[in-house]
């Protein structure tokens, strides 16, 4: 028995030496063997096999070729140990970078196929001249720029009311009444212009280094036209007596943002002309025929370009444009968005994707309701109600039709927030938020386009035939 054991040990030593020197794995195989030998003790199938202690492990030293020769003993051929599969949560494994890269590659390939299909089917539809000619067609009748210019009237009116309040020329009650009347006029005036003026047309089918030297201002010294128009043009909706200011204008940073603005503007126009418009036009017949399978197919086909355009628009507006304005005005607070892409709840998304609007809603709507003793969910409902009103206002007035799709979509966020918060957590919650963004937006787009098409282009039925 002893001779056989010795012979077996010699054979095992020779086999181990051959594996370490000639094995296809090379140094990696030897390293794996060393890790197995120094890892936690294995448990045999029957539990009665002797387990060597680390102290009994012979020294493993690399030979002249850099390989490790494994010592004698039957345990040296063990290749199994107690461990979980990598996809199991108990394994503790978290490096899925390769899978993420695979997702990116698959996304690029699938969208490349869609893009090529679009080019083959429609040809090149991008025409920047068409967009420019739209605005140059009638240069003496531009209601939108006229409305921007006319908005100065309401700003100056609010400014003059505040000046009268500062010197005590009018009472607080009168000032409040005048401010309310001015705000009501601001809301009604653009709607009246859009509905009454025939020429108006809807859209065609960093961290700052250093500290700035800043002089503080106190009320009523801030009541100057310079202060008024700084607030009007600053990338914020919340007024302060003393905004944080950056020490200087960074020319390189400003140039990069301006180039981004120009590039993404052309990219957005091209994607809309080339990708979205044909898809939307081809969606009218399924809607008219109420072919639900084709409607769903059109919806899913529109979801990809719509979502890509929305993401580009987000970067263009909240990073490029707002940073250009802030840099020119040396406005120090550049937190225009937070990590909304990591949102695991609907509430977190709405609190972090549009910081200027969120700060205004929180400061002037949500917190005052809480101070009055309102329940948090009631206060949030009030904020969504106000947001739903303005979303519908911004869509319905230019289109001259009221369908309440945007209003309904915003109010639907309240039960959606409860459902996601109640039944989805972590990555599942994040996936649910992404799903609502990818699918919800094209649904609203198709609803408005369909209703606008029916209202303006579809010939009415004659004689009830």
Image (tube, rainbow, N blue to C red):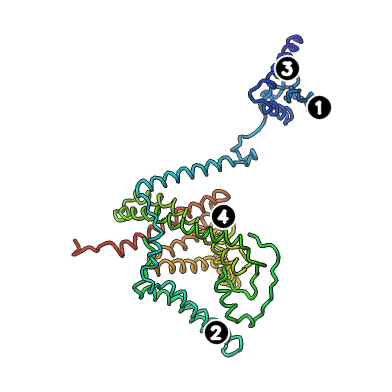
The quadrant of the rendering that contains the C terminus is bottom left
Residue labelled with disc 1 = 55
- Dot 1 falls on a residue whose secondary structure is helix
Residue 74 picture location, percent across and down: 72, 19
**CA distance separating discs 2 and 1:** 88 Å
**CA distance separating discs 3 and 2:** 97 Å
Rendered position, 24 above or below 241: above
Find residue 343 and name its label.
Answer: 4
- Dot 4 falls on a residue whose secondary structure is loop
**CA distance separating discs 1 and 4:** 51 Å
Comparing 342 with 111, the one in front is 111
Find residue 13 and name its label.
Answer: 3
Residue 222 picture location, percent across and down: 62, 80
**CA distance separating discs 1 and 3:** 20 Å
Residue 261 placement, left or right of 463: right
Residue labelled with disc 2 = 161
The quadrant of the rendering that contains the N terminus is top right
Q: Residue furthest bottom?
A: 169
Q: First in sequence, mark 1 or 4: give its number.
A: 1
Residue name at image x 34 percent, y 55 percent: 281
**CA distance separating discs 4 and 3:** 57 Å
Comparing 357 with 435, the one in front is 357
Q: First in sequence, mark 4 or 3: give its number.
A: 3
Residue 10 placement, left or right of 434: right
Q: First in sequence, mark 1 or 3: give its number.
A: 3
Residue 211 placement, left or right of 276: right
How many C-alpha atoms fall within 10 Å of the one at disc 2: few (<14), some, or many (≥20)?
A: some
How many C-alpha atoms fall within 10 Å of the one at disc 3: few (<14), some, or many (≥20)?
A: some
Rendered position, 155 above or below 122: below
């Amino acid at each position: 028995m002893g001779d056989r054991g010795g012979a077996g040990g010699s054979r095992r030593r020779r086999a181990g030496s051959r594996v370490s020197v000639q094995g296809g794995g090379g140094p990696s195989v030897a390293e794996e063997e060393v890790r197995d030998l120094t890892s936690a003790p294995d448990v045999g199938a029957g539990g009665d096999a002797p387990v060597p202690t680390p102290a009994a492990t012979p020294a493993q030293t690399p030979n002249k070729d850099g390989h490790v020769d494994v010592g004698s003993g039957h345990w040296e051929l063990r290749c199994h140990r107690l461990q979980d599969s990598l996809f199991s949560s108990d394994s503790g494994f978290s490096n899925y970078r390769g899978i993420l890269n695979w997702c990116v590659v698959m996304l690029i390939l699938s969208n490349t196929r869609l893009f090529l299909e679009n080019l083959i089917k429609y040809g090149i539809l991008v025409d920047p001249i068409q967009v420019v000619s739209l605005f140059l067609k009638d240069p003496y009748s531009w209601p939108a720029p006229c409305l921007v210019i006319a908005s100065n009237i309401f700003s100056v009116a609010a400014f003059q009311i505040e000046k009268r309040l500062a010197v005590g020329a009018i009472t607080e009650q009168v000032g409040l009444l005048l401010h309310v009347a001015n705000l009501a006029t601001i809301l009604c005036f653009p709607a009246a212009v859009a509905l009454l003026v025939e020429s108006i047309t809807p859209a065609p089918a960093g961290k700052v280094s250093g500290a700035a030297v800043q002089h503080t201002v106190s009320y009523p010294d801030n009541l100057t036209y310079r202060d008024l128009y700084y607030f009007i043009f600053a990338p914020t909706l919340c007024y302060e007596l003393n905004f944080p200011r950056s020490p200087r204008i960074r020319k390189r940073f400003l140039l990069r943002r301006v180039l981004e603005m120009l590039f993404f503007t052309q990219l957005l126009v091209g994607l809309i002309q080339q990708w979205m418009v044909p898809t939307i036009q081809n969606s009218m017949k399924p809607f008219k025929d109420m072919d639900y399978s084709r409607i769903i197919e059109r919806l899913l086909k529109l979801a990809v370009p719509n979502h890509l355009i929305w993401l580009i628009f987000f970067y263009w507006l909240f990073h490029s444009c707002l940073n250009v304005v802030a840099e020119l005005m040396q406005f120090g607070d550049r937190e225009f968005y937070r990590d909304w892409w990591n949102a695991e709840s609907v509430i977190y998304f709405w609190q972090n994707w549009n910081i200027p609007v969120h700060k205004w809603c929180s400061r002037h709507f949500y917190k005052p309701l809480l101070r009055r003793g309102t329940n948090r969910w009631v206060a949030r409902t009030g904020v969504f109600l106000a947001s739903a009103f303005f979303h519908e206002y911004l869509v319905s007035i230019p289109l001259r039709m009221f369908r309440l799709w945007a209003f309904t979509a915003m109010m639907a966020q309240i039960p959606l927030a409860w459902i996601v918060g109640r039944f989805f957590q972590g990555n599942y919650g994040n996936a649910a938020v992404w799903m609502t963004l990818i699918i919800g937006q094209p649904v609203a787009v198709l609803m408005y386009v369909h209703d606008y098409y029916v209202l303006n282009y579809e010939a009415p039925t004659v004689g009830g035939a």
